[in-house]
Amino acid sequence: MLTATLVTLSLALSPAPSGLAEPHKKDIAMRLVSSAENSSLDWKAQYGYIEDIDDGRGYTAGVIGFCSGTGDMLELVERYTRRRPGNPLAAYLPALRKVDGTDSHKGLGKPFMKAWKAAAADPVFRKAQDDERDRVYFDPAVAQARKDGLRALGQFAYYDAMVMHGPGEGALSFGGIRKRALTRALPPARGGDEVAYLNAFLDARKAAMRAEEAHEDTSRVDTMQRVFLRKGNLDLEPPLTWKVYGDRYSIKR
């Protein structure tokens, strides 16, 4: 009886597997996304990244791919300007407001790209990027995944989907992808099997990716997330090995 009591006590005191919000797991998530977005694990080197990747969203920039055509870049620069008036990007706010919702570069162009790279040297701008990433993408993704009863891998799957497709409710946005998955399987919070639900979610995610020419390469699902899922690594524990666009990456710990 004493042995059984000690075993029960030991299990009760053992820490639960950490979710994606735990600092080290969050850093892993940033590296995973960076491998797909920037072909690099060094996500902290991406604050100054900016280019038009011809996906119909204008400029894509920064640690999470803020876009001039989708509103999140505008909100980021507005946040930065509140914290640092007169910054190198403040003068472009009127142009960012005009191009929002389009792929236009009008009023931006090379001078804006140069100003973005200059602003990236400012720790206030880097902090603003981190804060907007968390407010718009990371925190909502993790919160919804936890409500659905998903562990770190599922939380990451939600986050990566929000990064690429946006947090909206449209058919090709995160909300639409999740709704499609729910027609095929139930998440753990509703009594479903976690692996079966995540497979349904990744299937829905792939369908959304294939609906857009710029996202038709589904390797970030096939040779990254699905690999972790097949190995049963629902807590996203290192070591991790995966491929994106044919390039191989690993995180040892």
Image (cartoon, grey):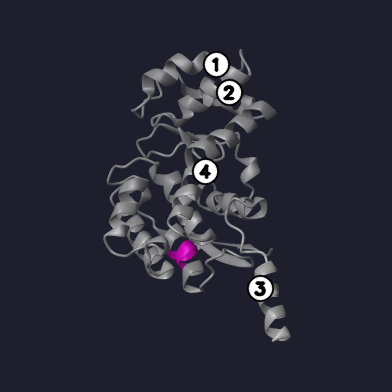
Q: How many labels does the image show?
A: 4
Three-letter code, disc 2 = Tyr
The residue indicated by pointer 2 is 80
Three-letter code, disc 3 = Leu
Three-letter code, disc 1 = Ala
Mark 2, Cα crowd under 10 Å, few <14 / some 14-19 / many 20+, is many
Please report whichever mark, 3 or 1, sits nearer to the chain's N-terminal start. Answer: 3
Choose between 159 and 90: the one closer to the eye. 159
Choose between 247 and 232: the one closer to the eye. 232
**Contact flag, marks 3 and 1 (Cβ < 8 Å):** no
Judge whether 82 appears above or below 46 on screen.
Answer: above
The residue indicated by pointer 3 is 11
Residue at 60%, 66% in the rendered image: 240
**Contact flag, marks 1 and 2 (Cβ < 8 Å):** yes
Find numbered disc 1 in the image and state the secondary structure of the residue it sits on: helix
Q: Distance between the residues labelled 3 and 4?
A: 29 Å
Magenta span? 222-226
**Residue 224 magenta-highlighted:** yes
User: Which label lies toward us, 1 or 2?
Assistant: 2
Q: Distance between the residues labelled 4 and 2?
A: 19 Å
Please report whichever mark, 1 or 2, sits nearer to the chain's N-terminal start. Answer: 2
Judge whether 4 appears above or below 253 on screen.
Answer: below
Three-letter code, disc 4 = Asp
The residue indicated by pointer 4 is 139
